[in-house]
Image (cartoon, grey):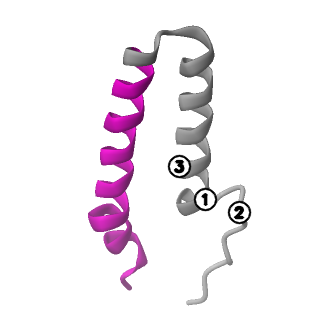
Amino acid sequence: MSQRPQTAATNPNVILPVLYALIVVVVASLASGTVTAIVAVVGAVLLGLYFAFGRKGRTRN
């Protein structure tokens, strides 16, 4: 059974980093530097965990 190819708009490997960058920019414009740093570090760790472990489960057949 063939699957439809994912476009950039439906691919979580594209959506998640873009969403992360957007969140960091919004927090940086609204909050202090400490809050921005915390959001950036926590988001980077979560994004790294997704690419290290979460993505593997989705690509296996």
Residue depicted at 55% across the width and 90% down the height: 1
Q: Is residue 59 left or right of residue 20?
A: left
The amino acid pointed to by label 2 is Ala
Which residue is the site of mark 1?
14
Residue depicted at 36% across the width and 82% down the height: 60
The amino acid pointed to by label 3 is Leu
Which is more toward the observer, 18 or 56?
18
Mark 3 and mark 1 residues within 8 Å of each other at the beta carbon: yes
Residue 53 numbered tag: none
How many neighbours does mark 3 have within 10 angstroms: few (below 14), some (14-19), or many (20 or more)? some
Residue depicted at 60% across the width and 51% down the height: 15
Mark 3 and mark 2 residues within 8 Å of each other at the beta carbon: no
Main SS of the magenta part reads helix
| Rendered location of residue 30, percent (x, y) | 58, 9
How many neighbours does mark 1 have within 10 angstroms: few (below 14), some (14-19), or many (20 or more)? few
Which residue is the site of mark 3?
16
Q: Is residue 43 magenta?
A: yes
Mark-to-mark CA distance, 3 and 1:
6 Å
Q: Is residue 38 above or below residue 2?
A: above
* Secondary structure of the residue carrying numbered label 2: loop
Image quarter of the C terminus:
bottom left
Residue depicted at 42% across the width and 78% down the height: 59
* Secondary structure of the residue carrying numbered label 3: helix
The amino acid pointed to by label 1 is Val
Which residue is the site of mark 2?
8
Q: Is residue 42 magenta?
A: yes
Write down the region rendered in magenta.
35-61
Q: Is residue 56 above or below residue 9?
A: below
* Secondary structure of the residue carrying numbered label 1: helix
Mark 2 and mark 1 residues within 8 Å of each other at the beta carbon: yes
Q: Is residue 57 left or right of residue 27?
A: left
